[in-house]
Image: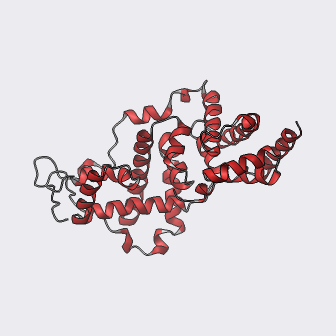
């Protein structure tokens, strides 16, 4: 696992839970701050607007406080918290068209990571081989790779992804949650979680490729 | 025009691009990983592709994250104080 999210590991979990139960303001402040990006991403996967997602996060914390004394630590604290967020959003979305399990709809479609036209056909020499190779981005100057323009493009590309893909890539690659955590929170298998992640990364990569190669 | 890519190493390039996340996620069997890496060692196109996916992940990881608004935070802290008193 990478990123700041992994700092809230299982070991720190017991301490954090104990501090919260003791009414430690600082611990609560820290938990509310560090878990916000992941909680918001889960909420945003089901509801239409940012402001509703923000409300859901607040409601979820009230649910967390209600349930904290009964929390048995069978999952990490964050996984449990994310599941509470998911439950609340599902209930809220129940009246909307989005009440359908969003990821299953996206998973039904086939979606190649790279357009089939980029590969040689079955009757050509070397079927399934590249017609022309992707370029080596390592030759791009770092200022370009991690420059503001590129990062804005990545943010836009993520924002425009189908809902389940956007939720998974935000949780995994932006926020740094682990695979198990994300699949548990979203109620999908790790395999399906990986399919969504792969498609999301492939779409963002394709956008970057058009940007770099023109 | 790229050099023709040999397919006799197990996976075709088209298969490799679909397996990239399984590889990066460590979700492959040892045998699959060996075949995958053999292909990468011999195919510049797929090597670049996998590096591009890695770069995409690295870029996503430096994006600014959502931040809790001060108003929401103070509401929650107030709720926490109430909960503590109960």
Vertical side of A182 occupied by A175: above or below: below
Q: Quadrant of the C terminus of chain A?
A: bottom left
Residue A114 in sight here: no
| Drawn side of residue A64 relative to residue A124, left or right | right
Residue drawn at 52 percent across, 69 percent down:
A147
Q: Residue at x 37, y 74 (%)?
A: A139
Asked if A171 appears above or below B52 in the picture, the reply is above
Colouring scheme, one of rainbow, by chain, secondary structure, one colour: secondary structure
Q: Residue at 26% across / 57% down in the picture?
A: B34
Q: Position of residue B48 (x, y in %)?
A: 32, 64
Judged left or right of residue A109, residue A68 is right
Q: Is residue A141 above or below residue B30?
A: below
Image-based side of B60 in relation to A43, left or right:
left
Q: Is residue A79 visible?
A: yes
Q: Is residue B12 above or below residue A211?
A: above
| Percent x, y of residue A162 | 47, 41
Q: Quadrant of residue A181?
A: top right
């Amino acid at each position: 696992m990478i990123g700041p999210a992994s700092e809230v590991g299982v070991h720190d979990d017991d301490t954090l839970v104990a501090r919260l139960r003791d009414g430690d303001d600082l611990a609560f402040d820290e938990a509310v701050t560090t878990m916000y990006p992941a909680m918001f991403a889960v909420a945003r996967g089901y509801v239409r607007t940012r402001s509703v997602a923000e409300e859901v996060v607040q409601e979820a914390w009230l649910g967390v406080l209600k349930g904290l004394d009964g929390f048995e630590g069978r999952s990490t604290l964050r996984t449990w918290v994310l599941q509470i967020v998911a439950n609340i959003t599902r209930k809220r979305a129940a009246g909307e068209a989005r009440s359908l399990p969003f990821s299953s709809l996206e998973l039904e479609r086939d979606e190649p990571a790279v357009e089939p036209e980029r590969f040689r056909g079955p009757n050509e020499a070397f079927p399934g081989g590249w017609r022309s190779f992707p370029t080596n981005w390592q030759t791009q100057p770092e200022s370009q790779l991690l420059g503001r323009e590129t990062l804005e493009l990545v943010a836009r590309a993520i924002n425009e992804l189908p809902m389940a893909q956007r939720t998974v890539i935000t949780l995994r690659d932006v926020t740094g949650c682990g695979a198990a955590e994300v699949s548990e929170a979203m109620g999908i298998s790790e395999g399906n979680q990986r399919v969504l992640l792969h498609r999301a990364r492939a779409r963002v990569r394709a956008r970057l490729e058009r940007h770099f190669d023109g | 025009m790229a050099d023709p890519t040999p397919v006799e190493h197990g996976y075709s390039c088209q298969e490799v691009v679909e397996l990239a996340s399984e590889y990066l996620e460590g979700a492959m069997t040892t045998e699959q990983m060996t075949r995958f890496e053999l292909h990468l060692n011999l195919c510049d196109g797929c090597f670049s592709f996998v590096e591009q996916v890695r770069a995409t992940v690295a870029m996503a990881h430096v994006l600014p994250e959502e931040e809790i608004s001060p108003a929401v935070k103070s509401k929650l802290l107030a709720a926490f104080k109430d909960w503590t008193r109960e």
